[in-house]
């Protein structure tokens, strides 16, 4: 085994999630395939990378709908690395991304916590 290819993120709606991830976050759409049963295979990842991506999976039942935005119990569960922290932070703020704190400069790098459109917490992180 060489790497984790995808992580599933349960979302309320394919199109609103796709709009957020490819808009304000600047991810690229890798695949959006209709599976013929009312579901889609929607795969996004940070633009220009070949690494791990997100499979945006629409919630199908009450249990899954209850997990939207709370998949990690309120903890930061996703870590978005950048090589231009200040530039990406400014671009994301201007695009309406909600940051929960001001940028911090720690021994391990520059970081700020933000929420996606459902309330999942992410770190925008430029490692030291």
Image: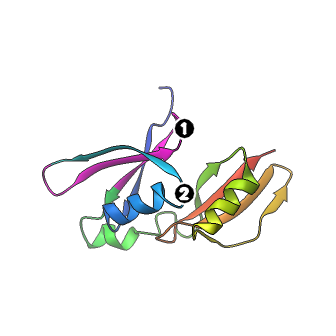
Observer-nearest residue: 82 or 63? 82
Where's the C terminus, which quadrant? Answer: top right
In the rendered view, does 12 fall on the left or right side of 123? left
What residue is drawn where x is 86% and y is 51%?
A: 107
| Residue 48 found in image quarter | top right
Q: Residues within 10 Å of mark 1 (few under 14, many from 20)?
A: few
Mark 1 or 2, nearer chain start = 2
| Residue 49 found in image quarter | top right
In the rendered structure, does residue 54 fall within the stretch colored magenta?
Answer: yes
The residue indicated by pointer 1 is: 48
Tell me residue 69's x, y (percent). Answer: 46, 69
In the rendered view, does 40 fall on the left or right side of 8? left
Observer-nearest residue: 72 or 23? 23
Which portion, as a residue range, is magenta? 36-56
In the rendered structure, does residue 16 fall within the stretch colored magenta?
Answer: no
The residue indicated by pointer 2 is: 25
What residue is drawn where x is 48% and y is 59%?
A: 23
What is the distance, in whole Å, between disc 1 and disc 2 at their CAs? 13 Å
Name the outermost residue toward the top: 1
What residue is drawn where x is 77% and y is 64%?
A: 103
What residue is drawn where x is 13% and y is 54%?
A: 37
In the rendered view, does 93 fall on the left or right side of 120? right
Tell me residue 65's x, y (percent). Answer: 33, 71
């Amino acid at each position: 085994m060489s790497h984790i290819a995808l992580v599933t993120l349960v979302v309320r709606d394919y199109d609103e999630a796709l709009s957020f991830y490819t808009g304000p976050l600047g991810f690229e759409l890798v695949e959006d395939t209709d599976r013929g049963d009312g579901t889609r295979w929607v795969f996004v990842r940070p633009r220009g990378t070949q690494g791990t991506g997100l499979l945006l999976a629409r919630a199908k039942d009450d249990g899954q709908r209850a997990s939207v935005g709370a998949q990690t119990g309120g903890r930061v569960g996703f870590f978005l690395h950048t090589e231009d922290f200040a530039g990406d932070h400014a671009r994301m703020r201007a695009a309406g991304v909600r940051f929960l704190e001001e940028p911090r400069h720690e021994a391990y790098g520059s970081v700020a916590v933000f929420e996606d459109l459902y309330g999942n917490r992410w770190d925008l992180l430029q490692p030291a």
